[in-house]
Amino acid sequence: MYRDHTKVIKIGDCRIGGGNPIRIQSMTNTKTENVTETVAQIQKLTAAGCEIIRCAVPTMEAAAALKEIKKQITIPLVADIHFDYRLAIAAMENGADKIRINPGNIGSRDRVKAVVDVAKERQIPIRVGVNSGSLEKELVEKYHGVTAEGIVESALDKVHIIEDFGYDNLVISIKSSDVLMCAKAHELIAEQTNYPLHVGITEAGTLISGNIKSSVGLALILSKGIGDTIRVSLTGDPLEEIKSAKLILRTLGLRKGGIEVVSCPTCGRTRIDLIGLANQVENMVADIPLDLKVAVMGCVVNGPGEAKEADIGIAGGVGEGLLIKKGEVVRKVPEDQLLAVLREELLHWND
């Protein structure tokens, strides 16, 4: 598989590439200059399972804030820079574990070299990021539009610029909001380079559309053995990105651990608030460190049978429900106690 043979890159104390676990990444949406709010968000994301965090650095004040942010967090910090090479240098001087730049918009070769020189001196990896929306005019003309081939050529051109300055501590990111184009671009670039790839569908959209596009796109890419870090880009709370990323990796068999919640669709037999109950269960199990499957079923007719592949489950009835283990009914429980009984069973699972 491609990811087994990518170059190993160290971001802080986190290693990516070379068959290391696929790392989940997100980006803060606070003003980086506001250290208190930014740290609070990073700590919440870390607790949810974020393993690498990226912060926008649009000002010198934001670059300076990285120093204090770094002191208060436990995961690697990536500085996201556009246009001003001095911000990239300042971010590294203030402790960024990695920087994300597009050499095409950072300025002249001399300015790119100035950034690379500092990165080389401090052994800080550079993520070369190219988005389909900012593809160079000459490549759009060459390929008669925005294409996967054009995205790959653009990214590799930027990589070669940095390589020419004698530096290869690099991660590549090529993104598009066009899912199939993005998948094709990753297949093409994986055949042409062994640098680790950060994978995601850019500008994916809101919670529903963004999750669907990201799930389809990431599945197409990751299932081919491509990708070393991922981000699910959503217009919303970054915590939702982490939940989705964990579920995508687990569904593809690329990560184990955590409780998987399965639930049946509602139908005319449903006599409880199944939608509310399933959501409550999903939230309730988030902090329980077990590798189990939990079923939430809407009726007592099919509940036990449908839940037989789960380790434990609950099925609703009229004013009461069933607690089920491995398809066998264990006990009846009043409806308003179902959630509490399930949590108690899970907390004492290994007793």
Image: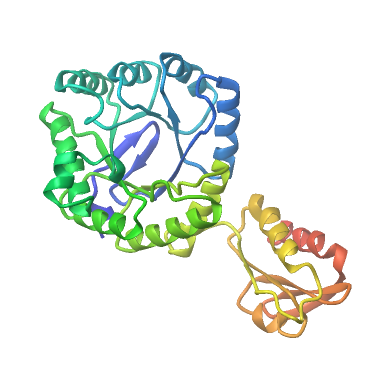
Considering only vertical position in the picture, is 296 above or below 147?
A: below
Tell which of 344 and 224 is nearer to you: 224
The quarter of the rendered structure image containing the N terminus is bottom left
- Give the side of residue 316 with respect to residue 116, left or right: right
Number of numbered discs visible in the structure rendering? 0
Considering only vertical position in the picture, is 44 above or below 285?
A: above
Considering only vertical position in the picture, is 346 above or below 33?
A: below
- Does residue 125 appear in the picture of this structure? yes
Q: Residue at x 55, y 20 (%)?
A: 35
Tell which of 211 and 22 is nearer to you: 211
**What colouring does the structure picture have?**
rainbow
Q: Residue at x 81, y 65 (%)?
A: 338
Tell which of 54 and 130 is nearer to you: 130
Q: Residue at x 23, y 44 (%)?
A: 195
In the rendered image, residue 127, in percent from the top left (x then y), is placed at 29, 35
- Give the side of residue 143 with respect to residue 61, left or right: left
In the rendered image, residue 131, in percent from the top left (x then y), is placed at 30, 42
The quarter of the rendered structure image containing the C terminus is bottom right
- Does residue 255 appear in the picture of this structure? no
- Give the side of residue 252 with respect to residue 1, left or right: right
In the rendered image, residue 302, in percent from the top left (x then y), is placed at 71, 84
In the rendered image, residue 44, in percent from the top left (x then y), is placed at 60, 37
Q: Residue at x 74, y 59 (%)?
A: 348
Quadrant in the rendering for residue 324: bottom right
